[in-house]
Image (cartoon, rainbow, N blue to C red):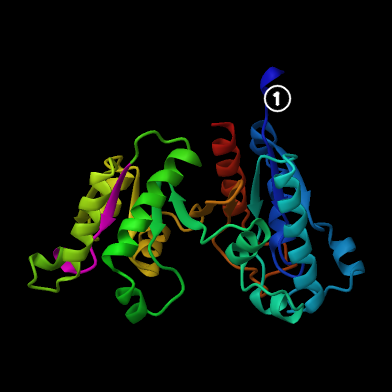
């Protein structure tokens, strides 16, 4: 009974009401393990009749859907800031609907940063024990390579180590840096970008942080998965996404760190094409809530 009383309160946003968010949230609430792990608090409509009554057409972009999704996030953030919930797990939103509603943010990370006044939150993927940070997100591959600078790598290593310790409770974490070039450049044979990465690593080590690498990207994610490292710093979007999603696509959970509270999320979209058909898998939503509950408890 005492364990039940100590369950963390997890805010769950229902996402865009025209997408699969309400369905997967409703399915998550029916999962017995979720109720054992936490006390879920839902923000946003999940009942089909209520959604229809709001004038939402399932599977379609709309300003109304974008507005409801945004307001649900606003309420969850406000509750987290007041200490009424311990973490937030989010269902998918639609960028076009947000734009139609005049929301001045492009996506979840930007919304959360704006509503909390947080500067450049960190994205962390967790998949069956593999944790992956990202040096850059939605930029071209050419731009991503230009962003692999000594200063940026050093700054992200410091932030990643602090996030693992402060947000996830991992004392003295060991973070590996993925190489950018094949075989980490083979001492300049395949590129010299690793020279700046190595300098960044040495600076981080001089600060007392435990850093490994650069380690070839073809092996570092496997090594982290089996426990050699607590996390990997991926140097561009697809490098880490491919590793995580190949390992287990549905159980790849996105965590946003550096906010006043922990946020977890499914790593898929609103799936307008199957919305309202009752066929959407809730595995990712269930994992997002379980992950939020696990770290909130620790």
Identify the residue shown where x is 64% and y is 63%: 114
Residue 7 location in percent, x, y? Answer: 67, 30
Identify the residue shown where x is 52% and y is 58%: 121
Q: Which residues are magenta?
A: 174-183
Tally the marks.
1
Query: Along the line of sight, which residue is nearer the eye, 53 or 115?
Result: 115
Query: Along the line of sight, which residue is nearer the eye, 164 or 64?
Result: 164
Residue 178 counted in the magenta span: yes
Callout 1 secondary element = helix
| Residue linked to disc 1 | 4
Residue 131 visible in the picture: no
Residue 116 appears in which quarter of the rendering?
Answer: bottom right
Residue 21 location in percent, x, y? Answer: 70, 61
Q: Is residue 86 above or below residue 127?
A: above
Residue 177 location in percent, x, y? Answer: 27, 55
Check disc 1: other Cα within 10 Å, few if <14, some if 14-19, many if 20+.
few
Q: Is residue 151 above or below residue 86?
A: below
């Amino acid at each position: 009974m005492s364990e039940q009383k100590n369950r963390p309160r997890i805010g769950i946003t229902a996402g865009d009401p025209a997408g699969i968010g309400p369905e997967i949230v409703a399915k998550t609430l029916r999962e017995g393990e979720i109720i054992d792990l936490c006390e879920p608090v839902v923000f946003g409509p999940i009942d089909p009749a209520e959604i229809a009554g709001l004038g939402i057409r399932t599977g379609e972009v709309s300003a109304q859907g974008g507005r409801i999704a945004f307001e649900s996030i606003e309420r969850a953030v406000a509750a987290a800031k007041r200490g009424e919930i311990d973490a937030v797990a989010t269902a998918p939103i639609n960028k076009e609907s947000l734009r139609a509603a005049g929301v001045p943010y492009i996506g979840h990370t930007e919304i959360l940063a704006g509503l909390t006044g947080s500067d450049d939150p960190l994205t962390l993927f967790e998949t069956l024990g593999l944790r992956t940070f990202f040096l850059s997100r939605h930029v071209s591959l050419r731009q991503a390579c230009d962003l692999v600078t000594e200063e940026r790598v050093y700054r992200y290593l410091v932030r990643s180590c602090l996030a693992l310790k402060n947000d996830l409770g991992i004392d003295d974490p060991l973070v590996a840096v993925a190489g950018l070039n094949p075989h980490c450049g083979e001492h300049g044979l395949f590129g010299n970008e690793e020279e700046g990465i190595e300098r960044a690593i040495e600076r981080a080590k001089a600060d007392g942080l435990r850093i490994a690498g650069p380690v070839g990207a073809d092996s570092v994610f496997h090594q982290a998965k089996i426990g050699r490292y607590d996390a990997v710093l991926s140097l561009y979007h697809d490098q880490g996404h491919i590793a995580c999603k190949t390992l287990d696509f549905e159980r790849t959970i996105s965590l946003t760190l550096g906010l006043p509270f922990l946020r977890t999320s499914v790593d898929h979209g609103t799936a307008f094409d199957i919305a309202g058909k009752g066929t959407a898998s809730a595995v990712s939503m269930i994992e997002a809530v379980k992950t939020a509950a696990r770290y909130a408890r620790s």
